[in-house]
Image (tube, helix red, strand yellow):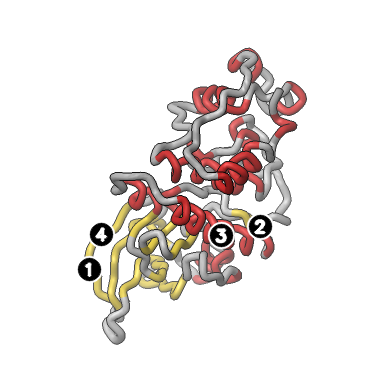
């Protein structure tokens, strides 16, 4: 790590801390993620999902892993530097985004997701904090620590993604989910871009199901029973109650398509 100097602290995560660094020979700014766990061999480092996925995924809308460094059994990931994340960008807004800005943001996220899915990976933790920005002009998906290969064999762990962006099949304990969960999360992000507040800010998993059912209707028994036998009693029968999204015609068309992607799940 002698070739880098730390400038300031950017944030903490479950698995590591992130600092803003600068490369001494070029002056380039980078984001350096220091892993909390100790790693005693390179084989152990290279087997990490984040490393395996980012070694195979190179795209303008996916954050670039520039270097992996192991020093004194501590592992560092050196990423390209991005100014902020989408949550921070939304938080500092004092007025709604323009329609053209939202289209641009969504297009870039979709480009990144499409590349991931075509190359056999899905993200599993898409949320505003994991979408990095240089304003609204350049958008990159980040944090691939939970990414999985689409062809990998289930069952998968059920506790993935931040609750507010978690797809119904995960909330209902499915272990056979796949890449569509990323599109569910993107739909939640889309609504949040229009309203500048989360679409489903559940306080618990049960409350999350309530909030989804209040918008989309109650999950049908054929879908719910294999994963969550009491869901019908918990939620009760609810009719859809659409959320107001102040979008223009193109935006409403996309929003409606996202809502209609899972008709088999609901009454």
Q: Position of residue 93 (x, y in %)?
A: 31, 47
Query: Are dots 4 and 1 in contact, CB under 8 Å?
Result: no
Of circles 4 and 3, which is in front?
Answer: 4
- Nearest-to-viewer mark from 2 and 3: 2
At 57% from the left edge and 55% from the top edge, which residue is drawn? Answer: 147
Answer above or below: position of 46 versus 181.
Answer: below
Q: Which residue position is annotated with label 2?
A: 149
In 3D space, how far apart are the residues under numbered discs 4 and 3 (Cα atoms)? 24 Å
Say whether disc 2 or disc 3 marks the residue closer to the N-terminus: 3
Mark 4 to mark 1 CA distance (whole Å) = 7 Å
Question: x, y (%) of residue 257?
Answer: 65, 42
**Quadrant the C terminus occupies:** top right
**Secondary structure type for disc 3:** helix
Residue 232 in view (yes/no) = yes
Q: Are marks 4 and 3 in contact (CB under 8 Å)?
A: no
Q: Which numbered disc, 4 or 3, marks the residue that appears first in the sequence?
A: 4
- Residue sitting at the far left: 7
Q: From where the camera sits, is residue 163 visible?
A: no
Residue 30 screen position, x and y as percent: 34, 71
Direction bottom: furthest residue: 25
User: Considering the image in quadrants, where does the N terminus appear?
Assistant: bottom left
Q: Toward which corner of the image does residue 56 lie, by quadrant?
A: bottom right
User: Is 92 left or right of 109, judged from the image as shown?
Assistant: left
Q: Position of residue 99 (x, y in %)?
A: 46, 51
Q: Which residue is disc 1 drawn over?
A: 7
| C-alpha gap between disc 1 and disc 2 | 35 Å
Q: Which residue is mark 4?
A: 9
Asked if the residue at tag 2 contacts the one at tag 1, i.e. Cβ–Cβ closer than 8 Å, the answer is no
> Could you say whether the residue bearing mark 1 is in a helix, strand or loop?
strand
Q: Residue furthest front?
A: 249
- Residue that numbered label 3 is attached to: 49
Relative to 94, 44 lies left or right: right
């Amino acid at each position: 790590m002698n070739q880098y100097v730390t400038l300031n602290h950017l944030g903490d995560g479950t698995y590591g801390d992130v600092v803003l660094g600068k490369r001494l020979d070029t002056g380039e700014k980078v984001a350096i993620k220091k892993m909390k766990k100790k790693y005693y061999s390179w084989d152990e480092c290279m087997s990490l999902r984040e490393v395996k996925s980012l070694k195979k995924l190179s795209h303008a809308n996916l954050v670039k892993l520039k270097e992996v460094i192991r020093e004194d059994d501590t592992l560092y990931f050196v990423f390209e530097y991005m100014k902020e994340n989408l949550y921070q960008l939304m938080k500092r807004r004092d007025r709604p985004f323009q329609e053209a800005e939202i289209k641009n943001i969504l297009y870039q996220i979709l480009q990144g997701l499409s590349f991931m899915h075509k190359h056999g990976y899905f993200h599993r933790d898409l949320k505003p904090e994991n979408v990095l920005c240089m304003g609204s002009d350049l958008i990159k998906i980040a944090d691939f620590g939970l990414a999985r290969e689409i062809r990998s064999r289930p069952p998968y762990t059920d506790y993935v993604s931040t609750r507010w962006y978690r797809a119904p099949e995960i909330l209902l304990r499915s272990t056979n989910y796949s890449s569509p969960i990323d599109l569910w999360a993107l739909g939640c992000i889309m609504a949040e871009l229009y309203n500048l507040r989360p679409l489903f800010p559940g306080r618990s998993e049960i409350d999350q199901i309530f909030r989804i059912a209040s918008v989309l209707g109650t999950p049908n028994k054929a879908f719910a029973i294999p994963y969550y036998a009491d869901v019908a009693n918990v939620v009760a029968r609810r009719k859809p109650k659409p959320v107001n999204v102040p979008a223009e015609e193109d935006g409403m068309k996309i929003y409606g398509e996202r809502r209609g992607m899972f008709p088999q799940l609901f009454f």
